Amino acid sequence: MKSPARLRQFMTILVVLLAPLGSAGTGHAIENKLVIVTSFPKDLTTPFKAAFESTHPGTTVEVLNKNTSAGVVYLRETAGNNTSDLFWVSAPDAFDVLKDGGLLQKFQPDASGIPDRIGEFPINDPDGYFHGFAASGYGIMYNTRYLRAMKLPAPREWHDLTQPVYYGHVGMSSPSRSGTTHLTVEVILQGEGWDEGWGLIKEMAGNFKTITERSFGVPDGVNSGEFGIGIVIDYFAYTSKASGFPVEFVYPQETALVPANVGVVKNAPHPEAAGAFIDFLLSDQGQEILFDPSIQRLPVKPAVYVKAPPGLPDPFEEGAIAAKVRFDAGLSKARYPVINALFDQMITFRASDLRRVAESIHDAEQALAVRPDAEAQALVTEARSLLAATPVSEAEAGDPDYVAIFEAGRRKSSGNAQQRQAEIERQWDRFVRGNYEEARKLADKALSMARKN
C-alpha cells in the first residue's frame, strides 16, 4: 500500500499529465483538435483562435476559410465522411439550409445574459441547431476624402445610390460569392417588395464601378479610393475606420439587424472542442474580443457594451439602429439559390450592359430637365420599366419545385439538374439582354428628341 506522501505525489503527477486534456471552465476533457469552416477573414478568426487555444492548452484550432455558399456546398459534399466541427458565418439563412439538410446537430451552450431577440430577429435557432454570437446590419460605407475630391454628397438611403451623380463610384460583391451580400439583397427585396426591390437594385447596379468576387473586396476598394462608396455589412466599415481610413458608415432606414451564427456540424469528429468553442464565444471574454479594432462586431450580450469603443452602436439601445425591415429568414432560405442566380444573370454577367443603359437614361433625363418633352419622357419611363423587369415572379422564385432545380444543379453529381438550370438561365439571359438593349434604344431616342426640341 502506498504511503500518503507517495499517493499525493502520484496524484499531483496525474493532474499535471491530464491538464492539457482539460477544458478551462468546462470541467471535462476536450479533444486536441478543432476544425472550423468559416467565411470570416483572418482579422476575426486569428484573435479568437489565439484566445481559445490559450484558454484550452493542448487543443489546436484549424480554420478552413470558404465563402458562405462554398462552405454550405463543402459540408454537403463531405457529409459522408465529415471532418469539420463547426460552421461559423454571418448568414442565418445558410444555417437554415444546413439544418433542413440534416447537416447540423443540436447543442445547448453554457451561456447567460443573452436576450431572445436582436431587434425583430431571434438570436438563436429555437430548435438549438445554431446560435448567434454577434449582430450585424447592412448599409453604405463611403470614403470621405473621395467624396470631397469628387464633390459628391454623402449617401444615406439605398435610393440615393440610383442618382446619376454616383455613376461609376459604387462597389458591391455578388451574393453568390458572399453570404452577407445575399442578406443585403434580401433586405432590399423584403423591404421594397419583389418588383420594386429588383428595380432598385438594378438602378443602383447601373452606377457600379465593379462587382467584387469576395465581400472584403468592397471595403478594400473604398479604403484605397478605387471607388468611393460600398454596399457592405457594418463591421467592414467599423474596422476600416478603427484602422485609420477616412471612412464613414450609415445604416439606411431599410435595413435589418440579424445575428452572425455558429453551429456544430453533424457527426463532428471533435464535439467536445466544438462545444467549448461556442461556450467561449458566448462568454464575457469571447464577447469582448468582438470589440478588437480588427473585428468591431456587435456582441449579443448587452452587459459587455459598457466596454464598447467609441462610435460602435449598441443595438439593444432604443433607436440606436433604425432597422425597419422585419427580416424573414424562412423566406430568404426558401429562395436562396434562385436569388443568387438571378442576381448574377441580371447584374453580375450583364454589368457593362447595365452601365450603358444607366448612362443613356441619365443623359436623357438630364437633357429633358432642360428641354421638357412629354413624348420623350414617356420613352424614358418605358426604358426604366424594361430595366426593372425581372424574368421570374416572386411566387415562382419561392416555389419549392423551381428552387429544387437550382439546389440540385449546384451539386456536381446532378447532371440533369445542372442542364435544366443552365436552360432556365439562358432563358433569363435572353429576356434580360433583350430588355436592356431595348431600354438603351428608347433612352437614346428620348435624348435625341430632347436635343432637337
Image (spheres, rainbow, N blue to C red):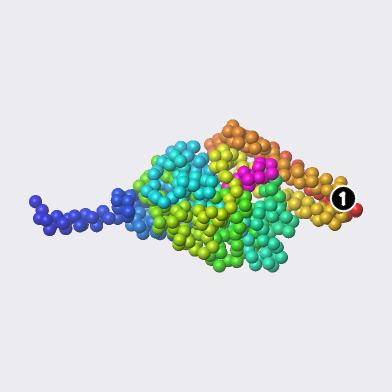
**Which corner quadrant of the image does residue 393 belong to?**
top right
**Which corner quadrant of the image does residue 420 belong to?**
top right
Rendering coords of residue 397 (x, y %): 63, 37
Identified at 70% across, 46% down, the residue is 199
Q: Main secondary structure of the magenta part?
A: helix
Identified at 49% across, 37% down, the residue is 100
Rendering coords of residue 402 (x, y %): 61, 34
Does residue 242 sit above or below 171 in this rendering? below
Left/right placement of residue 319 relative to residue 27 reads right
Asked whether residue 257 is in view, the answer is: yes
Q: Which residue is mark 1?
A: 373
Rendering coords of residue 35 (x, y %): 41, 50
Does residue 85 sit above or below 307 in this rendering? above
User: In this view of the protein, which residue sits in the foreground, 306 or 179?
Assistant: 306
User: In this view of the protein, which residue sits in the foreground, 23 or 160?
Assistant: 160
Identified at 74% across, 45% down, the residue is 387
**In the rendered structure, which amino acid carries the disc numbered 1?**
Asp
Q: Is 122 contained in the magenta span?
A: no
Left/right placement of residue 369 relative to residue 391 reads right
- Say which element carries label 1: loop
Q: Which residue, as the protein is rendered here, is positioned at the far top?
A: 401
Identified at 16% across, 56% down, the residue is 8
Asked whether residue 184 is in view, the answer is: no
Left/right placement of residue 174 relative to residue 379 reads left
Rendering coords of residue 78 (x, y %): 46, 42
Please give the range of residues in magenta. 181-197
Q: Which residue, as the protein is rendered here, is positioned at the far front?
A: 318
